[in-house]
């Protein structure tokens, strides 16, 4: 493919993408395929000679699209949103064309410097404390990770290295392995499974702290656990506080948990993967109060801020805590500016060496939408969630199971778990809308998350009528 054909095919692909997204409402949200459907449809090995481009495009419709779950359909209400916008797609195209691997400033100065500035822009939008920003030459700064899972793991590993140095400075007879065996981390019993995975990868004990009646981590229970573990000779070193839990979008109380962490010398990491986007709105910013106690903070613009995957924003108060844990400088990666104090080499802030020019997506989206446009987008989703909550509350057969704060509604039929499992099976079996469940205490609960960029009130209304109709069938009664 030469440049001339690329121009032609590129325009065709943009048209194909725009047509797909404009017509996505008419697509069945969940595919009809069964596991293993794809392999029989393609050859067992790669072609020895080039295929015609037209054949490839035909195979997209024949092979790929029948197996796609349409995450951007206005009838997709599962998980949490994954962001999508035309400016972000265009930025991704440019990223692919530039094709730099921005592991250091020298590898592509613009890639590094735009990321630093965009993370400061975003931090200002959230009104983060100055300690987290790089703009005034402080000790902190931001970095784009691939996911919140990576950010949690990076924070845990940095905290592990920091506490190991501290303990060995006062107890040099202890080996690194001996210290590692004593370390213990904590998170709410509502925290994401990636927190538990970070503990497994990091080789440290992770303990679940009971949540209260609002599904928030109990600060008293955390303090008690820390005291018990210290009395047993363990070393509490790391706490994950979640703002916007995956099951029900509950919020750990930073103003209660934070002082405990600071007093006990434990690293506090805030995981706000979904909810963090809402903090650009003044009315939701109080949910972040207490961030000043944290050592690291993370959320995913690729969930709710119209920036396509992947783009996970992470800030640290002291960037040396990250670079001190991961810095390696083989000769082939060194460059003349690395010790100048004027630049950042982001390879020291992450697990992989290579990194894409992801900050272009932030730059495009922020400039095309503006802060007010992004705030309006978040507020619309929250409004639609409250609309759905109101519809549920008007039907005496159903109950709301957790506070509706942002764009997620947890609800269920009044009755047994088996009844609600059967309802969800009917909902997803019909494939007109898509939901996923969660467990809240001993209850099987349905989650209704406002996800699509193009979702409107009429889609929420139709989804509710569909749910009510299936519930009526299940209960053996007419629709009220």
Image: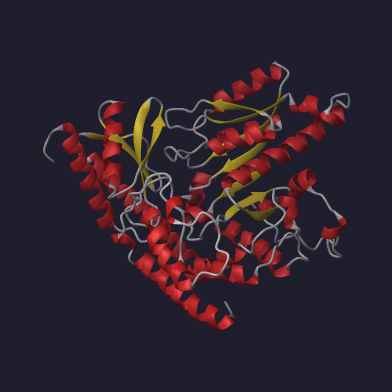
Q: Position of residue 75 (x, y in %)?
A: 32, 53
Q: Is residue 480 visible?
A: no
The answer to whether 24 appears left or right of 13 in the picture is left
The C terminus appears in which quarter of the rendering?
A: top left
Q: How many marks?
A: 0
Residue in front for this viewpoint, 462 or 340 = 462
Residue 470 percent coordinates (x, y): 20, 40
In the rendered view, tell whether residue 117 sits above or below residue 41: below
When asked about the image quadrant of residue 334, the answer is bottom right
Residue at 68%, 61% in the rendered image: 116
Front residue (pair 89, 296): 89
Quarter of the N terminus within the rendering: bottom right
Point out the residue furthest to the left here: 478
Q: Position of residue 4 (x, y in %)?
A: 55, 83
In the shown orientation, is residue 416 left or right of residue 105?
left
Residue 293 lies, with reference to residue 91, above or below; the image says above
Tell which residue pokes out farthest to the top in this image. Answer: 232
Q: Nearer the viewer, residue 288 or 273?
A: 273
**Residue in the foreground of this view, choosing between 477 and 118:** 477
Q: How is the image coloured?
A: secondary structure
Q: Residue furthest bottom?
A: 4
Q: Is residue 185 left or right of residue 469?
A: right
Q: Is residue 468 left or right of residue 175?
A: left
Q: Position of residue 447 (x, y in %)?
A: 36, 41
Q: Is residue 23 visible?
A: yes
């Amino acid at each position: 493919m030469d440049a001339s054909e690329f121009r032609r095919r590129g325009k065709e692909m943009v048209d194909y993408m725009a047509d797909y997204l404009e017509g996505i409402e008419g697509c069945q949200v969940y595919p009809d395929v069964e596991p293993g459907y794809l392999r029989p449809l393609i050859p067992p090995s790669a072609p020895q000679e080039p295929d015609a481009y037209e054949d490839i495009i035909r195979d997209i419709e024949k092979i790929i699209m029948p197996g796609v779950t349409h995450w951007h359909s206005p009838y997709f209400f599962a998980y949490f949103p994954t962001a999508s916008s035309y400016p972000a797609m265009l930025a991704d195209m440019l990223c692919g064309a530039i094709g730099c691997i921005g592991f250091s400033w020298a590898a592509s100065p613009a890639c590094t410097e735009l990321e630093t500035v965009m993370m400061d822009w975003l931090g200002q939008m959230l009104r983060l404390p100055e300690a987290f920003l790089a703009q005034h030459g402080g000790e902190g700064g931001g970095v784009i990770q691939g996911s919140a899972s990576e950010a949690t793991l990076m924070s845990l590993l940095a905290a592990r290295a920091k506490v190991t140095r501290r303990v060995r400075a006062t107890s040099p007879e202890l080996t690194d392995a001996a210290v590692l065996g004593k370390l213990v981390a904590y998170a709410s019993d509502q925290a994401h499974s990636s927190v538990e995975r970070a503990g497994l990868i990091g080789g440290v004990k992770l303990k679940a702290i009971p949540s209260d009646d609002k599904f928030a981590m109990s600060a008293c229970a955390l303090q008690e656990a820390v005291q018990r573990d210290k009395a047993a000779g363990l070393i509490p070193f790391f706490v994950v506080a979640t703002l916007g839990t995956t099951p029900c979008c509950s919020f750990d109380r930073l103003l209660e948990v934070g002082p405990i962490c600071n007093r006990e010398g434990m690293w506090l990491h805030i995981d706000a993967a979904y909810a963090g986007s809402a903090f650009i709105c003044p009315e939701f910013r109080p949910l972040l109060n207490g961030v000043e106690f944290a050592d690291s903070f993370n959320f995913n613009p690729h969930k709710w801020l119209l920036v396509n995957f992947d783009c996970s924003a992470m800030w640290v108060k002291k960037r040396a805590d990250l670079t001190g844990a991961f810095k390696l400088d083989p000769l082939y990666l060194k460059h003349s500016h690395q010790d100048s104090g004027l630049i950042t080499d982001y390879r020291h802030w992450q697990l992989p060496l290579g990194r894409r020019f992801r900050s272009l997506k932030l730059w495009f989206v922020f400039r095309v939408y503006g802060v007010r446009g992004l705030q309006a987008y978040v507020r619309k989703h929250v409004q639609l969630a409250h609309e759905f909550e109101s519809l549920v509350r008007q039907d005496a057969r159903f109950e709301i199971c957790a506070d509706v704060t942002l764009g997620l509604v947890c609800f269920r039929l009044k009755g047994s778990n088996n009844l609600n499992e059967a309802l969800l099976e009917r909902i997803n079996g019909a494939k007109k809308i898509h939901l996923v469940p969660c467990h809240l205490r001993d209850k099987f609960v349905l989650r209704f998350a406002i996800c699509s960029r193009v979702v409107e009130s009429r889609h929420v209304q139709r989804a509710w009528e569909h749910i009510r109709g299936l519930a009526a069938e299940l209960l053996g009664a007419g629709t009220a």
